[in-house]
Image (cartoon, rainbow, N blue to C red):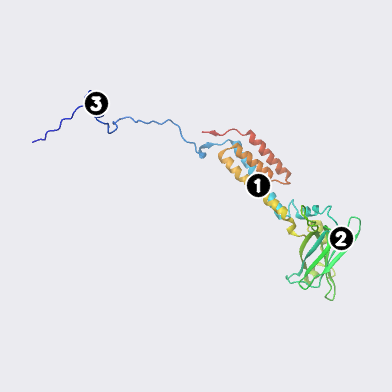
Amino acid sequence: MEEDEEPVEEADESTPESLKPILTGLPEVEDSVFSSSGARIMLPSDRRQHSMVFWLSALLLVTAMLGFINGLDYIDGDSGLINHRRFINMDTKGAAPGSAILLGTVVYEDGSAAPNHVVQVTVKRDDGTIIEKGNITDENGNYRIEGLDPGVQVLMIANGSRGTAQLVQHLVLLNPAPKMTFEPVGFTTLRLTFPSDDTFEQESEDGSFINYVPYEAANEMELYDSSAAGLYVMIGVGFSGIALIGIVATVLGYRDGGRGMLRMAAVFVFLSQGPYGSACCLGALAFGLTFALPKVHYD
């Protein structure tokens, strides 16, 4: 016997709102409720850069590399356009006479100390006066000479302890007193190497005198205290660092097509050039071209 189904009570319009059945699901529809508007998110890879952005970025990268090389030139100081000796010698102009002190050690080619060697500096002043001052190395090869004039002078090292005197001459660059300090004298510390007998036989005519002065004068290779060039090394590091910042800004500007970023890169690249006049012109040209860049276009 079939069970009787319970009759479903239909809601009557007269039924109060609180007693009407509640909708517990969504009606089924055949058509989709949502439709595409055609809009999409633009990714950096979807952007279409203007060709001028590429060529401007290439110009900035080349100029930035020149700025980086300029920094390395300052750091090296023995080759290229920048010469540490030349800058130090310029600083000696106008320095007080007798305000330089030379000190250090004399060693043999094998690195051992050279005692009882004469170290003498010949100073020739602008008025023609010639002053010779020297000292004898102690048992550890140490020496100290005071009252010298800053600038390029002639240095002689002599060894008379052997049967025949042996002499070697160099040009030496003596430091002036440091600027913006209360130190009245400039110190130059040098480790001097005295040639061996074999070197004297090979490089001197009579086996007792070697003169390096002509070669050092022609090639700006005077003996000098490299610590005096610390300021110029710091400048070189700064130029190289600014150039690297310019390279990073160029890459970011090219990727995003931002005129502001490329303009900032041009400023950094320009500041990294130092004495490279032609490269400075390239940096200025790149900065000017950033104002001619069109706005970023999208596909």
Disc 2 secondary structure class: strand
Residue 5 image offset from top left, x and y in percent = 14, 33
In the image, is residue 288 above or below residue 241?
Answer: above
Left or right of residue 184, residue 4 in this image: left
At horizontal 24% and vertical 26% (from top left) the residue drawn is 16
Q: Nearer the viewer, mark 3 or mark 2?
A: 3
Query: Which residue position holds label 3?
Result: 16
In the image, is residue 22 above or below residue 146?
Answer: above
Determine the residue located farthest toward the right in the rendered image: 128
Query: Where does the N terminus fall, quadrant-wise?
Result: top left
Three-letter residue code for mark 2: Val
Query: Which residue position holds label 2?
Result: 123
Residue count near mark 1 (Cα–Cα under 10 Å), binned few <14, some 14–19, many ≥20: many
Residue 280 image offset from top left, x and y in percent = 71, 42
Disc 3 secondary structure class: loop
Residue 57 image offset from top left, x and y in percent = 61, 41
At horizontal 65% and vertical 47% (from top left) the residue drawn is 243
Determine the residue located farthest toward the bottom in the rendered image: 163
Q: Earlier in the sequence, mark 1 or mark 2?
A: 2
At horizontal 60% and vertical 39% (from top left) the residue drawn is 261
Report which quarter residue 99 is drawn in: bottom right
In the image, is residue 22 above or below residue 100?
Answer: above
Q: Nearer the viewer, mark 1 or mark 3?
A: 3
Q: Earlier in the sequence, mark 1 or mark 3?
A: 3
Left or right of residue 277, residue 29 in this image: left
Report which quarter residue 7 is drawn in: top left
Q: CA distance from mark 1 to mark 3?
A: 80 Å
Q: CA distance from mark 3 to mark 2?
A: 120 Å
Q: How many marks?
A: 3
Q: Nearer the viewer, residue 70 or 128?
A: 128
